[in-house]
Amino acid sequence: MADALDAADGDEFFGRLRSLASGAMNVARRVGRGVGQAARVVGPIASMIPLPQAQLIGRMANVAGRLLADGADEFEAFDDFVDGLDDDAIDAAAPVLAGMVVRRAVPAIARAAPAVRRAAVRGVTRAVRQAVRRQGPPAARAVARAVRATRRVVQQRRVPPRQAARVVQRAAQAVARRPQAVRRLARPLVPAARRTTPRGPAARVVARTVAPVARRAAVVTPGTVAARRAGVVGAAGGCAHCGGRRINVRGPVSIHIRAR
């Protein structure tokens, strides 16, 4: 998400996400083909690991791209994703949702150094997950609204990007911790009278095409609710020293992926 934030407009942003997702899937296919005689056994397992997240990003980018082509903006797309995804699916999709909001709401961060962009996306991602786990999918809108409210402060006070990222993180997390604020701010970001596309059809497309992949991604993403239910351990609950993550799959096999 951070790598795509500095796109010139929404079309380029979602185009970059599609390219990143496509690249990840191509790598997975090459891994599957490169295992020789064991391809029939290892290929399906190897391809299963990166593909759910890559497919999720690609499908969200496709839906959002179509909405933008119809005249919508990122906030309207955000509403449709929230309407079409359940708790587990939003847990997995949170980084994409966070990237959409940060890029649209605080352009100064979108144009900042990669480390600043990553910090902002991570902070908003945590806030979205925290709010949704406590109060359901509509709570994601409260976090998005809090991020959007920081834009005026950042612009008026000419806050440097690194400090702006901290402002965004604090605002998002402060709202996520306050149930009353979440309930008050969880209404749609774009009122029905200002929408360029009708509310409902896009959410149904999201539920049909994005939600199933998001749920699969949630199961293999350490730290999500679905991953904890499935017994997956990793960055949020695995070895603190080995620098890797472990994903358990059905069958008598355990695959370890370690960073180089």
Image: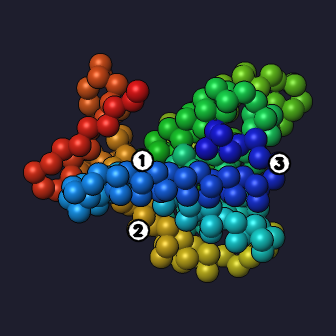
Q: Residue at x 72, y 22 (%)?
A: 162
Label 2's element? helix
Residue plotted at (30% across, 48% down): 227
Answer with the quarter of the image where residue 165 lies.
top right
Residues packed near mark 1 inside 10 Å, few (<14), some (14 to 19) or many (20 plus): some
Residue 233: horizontal and vertical position, in percent? 26, 38
Type of the residue with mark 3: Ala
Q: Which tag is nearer the camera, tag 3 or tag 2? A: 3
Q: Tell me which label, 1 or 3, sits earlier in the chain.
A: 3
Residue 132: percent from left, percent from top? 47, 50
Q: Residue 204 shows which numbered tag?
A: none
Mark 3 highlights which residue? Answer: 8
Front-lying residue, 208 or 196: 208
Which picture quadrant has residue 260? Answer: top left
Query: Considering the numbered disc 1 on the image, is that residue within a helix, a strand or a loop?
Result: helix
As rendered, which of 239 and 185 lies closer to the eye? 239
Taking the image as shown, residue 160 lies to the left or right of residue 204, namely right
